[in-house]
Image (cartoon, grey):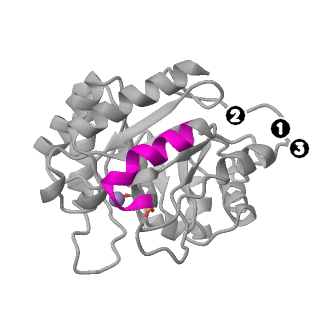
Amino acid sequence: LASRTFKSKDSIYDIGGIKIGGENFLTIAGPCAVESKEQVLETALFLKEKGVKFLRGGAYKPRTSPYSFQGLKEEGLKILKEVSEETGLKIVTEVMDTREVELVSRYADVLQIGTRNMQNFVLLKEVGKLNKPVLLKRGLSATYKEFLMSAEYIISEGNNQVILCERGIRTFTDETRNTLDISAIPVIKRYSHLPIIIDPSHASGDWRYVAPLSKAAVAAGADGLIIEVHPDPKNALSDGKQSLNFEQFSELMDQIKALLEID
Ligand code: PEP
Ligand code: MN
């Protein structure tokens, strides 16, 4: 069902009047984690001014250490909803557990399945029963086939609104957090009709590399970007090192817009 041989034309979804896929470029931005109403609202107002229509922010965070900030959970979801109502931005947020699918889907416009859950087949089937787009992130060491098979799990349950996301894979590099696999864009586009977007933030783990990777992704034909932006990256509760501040994001958006207009 995810394959080009099943459906030759690019999939296009409509999220409350906003089109995703095909000729439409999707920009999702926002903090790694929801920390407070003030933090999310300040970011959302800034992003709206920049023309961004989708706000990201985790309320449930898959942290490497159990002692790191785990997210505000339902309180975080409520903050996202309030900010969405106040700004009109659509919400992209992660669901980590089947027990929370129903709850998260009441607040989110797009449900994110994180890298670590790409092959959590029970969770994939659960979001497959929803009538809501799912942003599926590629596993740390998943092959393209495995990645597409995970999308297949969601679609085969009835939900055909899957957005794929390449967010860097594990290699031997020690300078970046992961290695952005740019090849994922043309390869996935060859074999699948699903849109594929790029997450340069988790791919690099360093704000310095986010702009060049974003531009490479646009040049390679990505359908969109998901970028971590924080009003005060130095004091972020998670992923501050890879988050852009407002000024940096603003500059990047101008460059991306220029690139998109060329083609
Ligand atoms: C995230 O988007 O905040 C996140 C945890 O991403 P990933 O699952 O790609 O690590
Ligand atoms: Mn993050």
Q: Which residue is mark 3?
A: 5
Q: How far, Cα to Cα, is label 1 from label 2?
A: 8 Å
- The secondary structure making up most of the magenta span is helix
- The first of marks 2 and 3 along the sequence is 3
Is 240 inside the magenta-drawn segment?
no
Q: Secondary structure at mark 3?
A: loop
Residue at the (83%, 37%) spot, across then down: 7
Crowding at label 1, few (<14), some or many (≥20) Cα neighbours within 10 Å? few
Mark 3 near mark 1, Cβ–Cβ under 8 Å?
Answer: no
Amino acid tagged 1: Lys
Crowding at label 3, few (<14), some or many (≥20) Cα neighbours within 10 Å? few
Residue 171: x and y, percent?
55, 74
Q: In the image shown, does 109 or 98 lie closer to the viewer?
A: 109
The reply to whether residue 26 is visible in this rendering is: yes
Which span is picked out in magenta? Answer: 204-218
Give above or below for 81 relative to 199. Answer: above
Mark 1 near mark 2, Cβ–Cβ under 8 Å?
Answer: yes
Q: Which residue is mark 2?
A: 11
Residue at the (74%, 51%) spot, across then down: 187
Ligand 2, image quadrant it occupies:
bottom left
Most extreme residue toward the right is 5
